[in-house]
Image (tube, grey):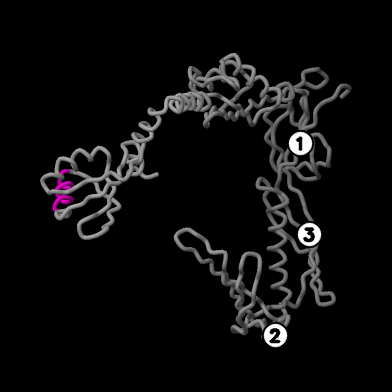
Amino acid sequence: MTMKMQHDFFQGSMKIKVQGKMIEPFLQACVRRGCVISNIKRVNEHEVIMSIRLSEWKTFRQLRKKYRCKLSILGGRGLPFYYRKITQRKALMAAFMLSVVVVFLLANTLWSIKVEGLTPELEANVEKKLKTYGVSPGKLTIGMDDPNDIQRKLLDDIPDLLWIGVNKKGTSYQLYGVEKTRHDTNKNLRPSDLVAEKKGMIVKTFIEKGRPLVTVNDVVKKGQKLATGQLVEDKDILVHAEGEVIAETWYKVDQNLPMTQVLQLTDGLEVREYQLKIGSLTLPIWGWWKGKGSQFRSENEETNWEWFGWRSPIDLKAIHYYEIDSKKYEQSKDKIQKMGIITARESLNQYLGKEAKVMKEKVLHLREENGKVKLILLFKVHENIAVTKYISQGD
């Protein structure tokens, strides 16, 4: 509803008939007085029908004698006229007042509370606290605390809540909470060692807590202790060992690469086909009778028709078919070797992660077999091989 329509509804509007020989001067005089005239319809030369605001009726009556015009009321719309009709009927007036009260009570009653993002136990705790604040379904929202005050009370009264949002939407409350993450501090204090996750040669050590057991250039096996949480040998003084042990490790990668590569080239436009789409139904309208073999590549293009934000259910689909010409060419062993090293290094980096570094690669084997090149590569990597192993009783 526009602002003008809302104004006319609350202030009231009238449909009137004006008769006389000086209608045009009369209407111009009314407009100069600030009157708003709409929906003008000329019945004949000396009679027009129009709509005016109820508050401007007095101005029309004041000017009608000067311009010798006759005014007739054909009808009225808006709240003042509804109020007049209602007041003329006491029973209807009482029912109207009662309905206003009922609507007011319904609009100001809390009907539902929804809590999301929390465990069932914490959710029940939040709902219990809300009841103590007087916030529960079936109660009037008039007199309830502001959502910001409710949020503050919940955060103060429930220590397990990291954050909670309270949002009032109409006749419901929506809450979304985040529970505090409790870390097991005792777990971090448990005595532990650092052991080798894999075989390697130590290139750098950085032990924050614990007693180092290896040095640079030592070759360690998988599962070997790198640092221990036993600070003093033969004494029961244990800590949680922490740190990094960077070692040189080796990875072997096998690849079989084809000598002959097939390159598919696209020739000029061969066939165009047009289809009409009506919902899920597709109707061919042009080019459907032309044959298309397997050596064609297709590209689809759809045209969506819209008018003033309304999308048409009918679309035009164009399919372009391009002929494919396959070309075969052979590559040299040197080029295949370079390509194999690049792809193997990229795959190894994805497997290792960001912290590991590929330092060097070496070709162990390069041989042509049955139109393919067999390539075996050895990569030297620097990575952290230290993992935590907790000390159990009896160690």
Quadrant in which the C terminus appears: top right
In the image, is 75 to the left or to the right of 212? left
Amino acid type, mark 2: Gly
How would you rate the neighbour count of disc 3 (Cα within 10 Å): few for under 14, some for 14-19, many for 20 or more? some
x then y, percent, for residue 257: 77, 70
Mark 3 to mark 1 CA distance (whole Å): 25 Å
Mark 2 sits on what residue? 291
Closer to the chain start, of discs 1 and 2, is 2
Q: Earlier in the sequence, mark 3 or mark 1?
A: 3
Residue under the image location 53 percent in, 66 percent down: 304
Residue lying furthest left = 66
SS for callout 1: strand
Picture quarter containing residue 219? top right
Q: Which residues are magenta?
A: 25-33
Q: Amino acid at mark 1?
A: Val
In the image, residue 379 lies at what x, y percent? Answer: 74, 56
Q: Nearer the viewer, residue 360 or 28?
A: 28
Q: CA distance from mark 1 to mark 2?
A: 64 Å
Q: Residue 21 location, x and y as percent?
A: 15, 55
Which residue is identified by label 3? 253
Q: Is residue 257 above or below residue 231?
A: below
Amino acid identity at mark 3: Val
55 left or right of 99 in image: left
32 within the magenta span: yes
